[in-house]
Image (cartoon, rainbow, N blue to C red):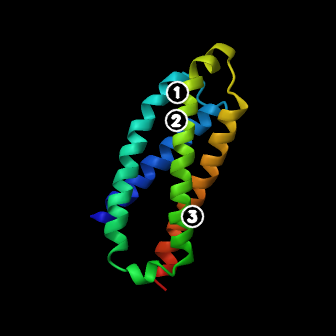
Amino acid sequence: MALTVHAFGTALVIGFVLIIGLRLLGWFELIPYSLLNRLFPVIWVALVLQLLSGFALWSTKPTQYVVDVAFLLKFSLVIVGTILTLSLYRTVKREAASWEAKGAVSSRGVQFVAAALVVWCVVLVASRLTAHLGAI
């Protein structure tokens, strides 16, 4: 059950960050920038689900995970990704109206979204490496 919840939380976080990211990079032009704020509460709930289910999964093999490089990378980048996503949320909330008026995203918005996308994609790869390499 914990693994299912963890995978679902991961899919929501990465999926919604990807949607926000692609919108800020010029895709999905029918979605107004101001509506992107509605996706962030789902991201926060999914992060809590990930935290709780991740702790449940970690507690099954803590000695294995504390020496697993892929797990340590994933855990560190989840923290970085969360901080970047919070910064992205604040930027979208503050600047969405001006982006709609100008028809373009600020360089600050593009920088946050690019960094967040890279970090969350590496989290996804590290997650899979943790699952597969941990079984060896």
Whether tag 2 and tag 1 are in contact, CB under 8 A, the answer is yes
Q: Is residue 71 positioned above or below 90 on the image? A: below
> How far is disc 2 from disc 3 in space, using C-alphas?
24 Å
* Residue designated by label 1: 93
Residue at 27% from the left image edge and 64% from the top image edge: 1
Q: Position of residue 50 (x, y in %)?
A: 38, 57
Q: Residues within 10 Å of mark 3 (few under 14, many from 20)?
A: few
Q: Mark 1 and mark 3 in contact (Cβ < 8 Å)?
A: no
Q: From this viewpoint, which residue is outermost toward the top?
A: 101
Between marks 3 and 1 in the image, the one whose residue lies nearer the viewer:
1
Q: Position of residue 88 (x, y in %)?
A: 57, 38
Amino acid type at circle 1 is: Lys
In the rendered image, the vertical position of residue 84 relative to residue 63, given as above or below? above
Q: Which residue is mark 2?
A: 89
Q: Secondary structure at mark 1?
A: helix
- Tell which tag, 2 or 3, sits nearer the viewer: 2
The answer to which of marks 2 and 3 sits earlier in the sequence is 2
Q: Which residue is identified by label 3?
A: 125
Q: Is residue 31 visible?
A: no
